[in-house]
Image (cartoon, rainbow, N blue to C red):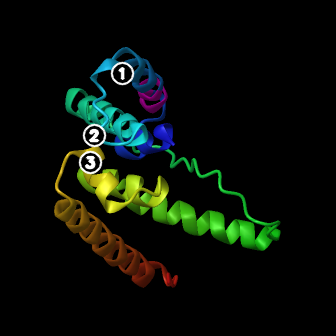
Amino acid sequence: MVLRTIYLITQDREASEELAQETFVRAYRKQHHFRGESSERTWLYRVACNMAKNHLRRRPEQRGRGEIIDFDRRATAHPGPEEVAARRESRARILSVVAELPAELREVVALYYLDEMSVTEVAEVVGIPAGTAKSRLARARSELRRTLRETDAVTGNAYE
């Protein structure tokens, strides 16, 4: 889950793998700094998000625009091949639109939807007020809807 979150922020597979490993090393080395004001999970995600954002600040030119990787491991009960293909296509389409969001919106989307954190947890991880986290989620949803509708108008697809 840490890898998926970092990847969604950086859009760089190699860097994400390195940053995920470094997140756990840094968390281990800095565990004495954990004050218990949040859950260990929230603290670990904060370390991961900070590392991803620092990576983008240091190397903005390396932000990947390559393949979209789906790290979702949630299994479904034996869907048929057509359903699998349709889900994969829909998910890839959504992930590609999410990848185009600004980093601050991608971050809250990843934590809220992919890592299934509450708005309060997202706010703690990102280091912003809960109201700001809600606002960013609303902006991200609005932007996603707008972009998906625009692509639907061009391609003739219908996204629900």
Q: Earlier in the sequence, mark 1 or mark 2?
A: 1
Q: Which residue is painted at 18% across and 65% down in the image? A: 131
Residue 53, by quadrant, is top left
Q: Which mark is residue 111?
A: none
Residue 42 lies in quadrant: top left
* Prevailing SS of the magenta stretch: helix
SS state under label 3: helix
Image point (27%, 40%), residue name: 37
Residue on which disc 1 sits? 31
Quick one: SS at disc 1? helix
Question: What residue is shown at x 31% (from left), y 77% (from top)?
Answer: 146
**What's the amino acid at mark 2?**
Glu
Q: Is residue 7 magenta?
A: no
User: Magenta segment, which residues?
Assistant: 15-20
Q: Is residue 72 left or right of residue 94?
A: right
Label 2 environment density (alpha carbons within 10 Å; few <14, some 14–19, many ≥20): few
Q: What amino acid type is highlighted by mark number 3?
A: Glu
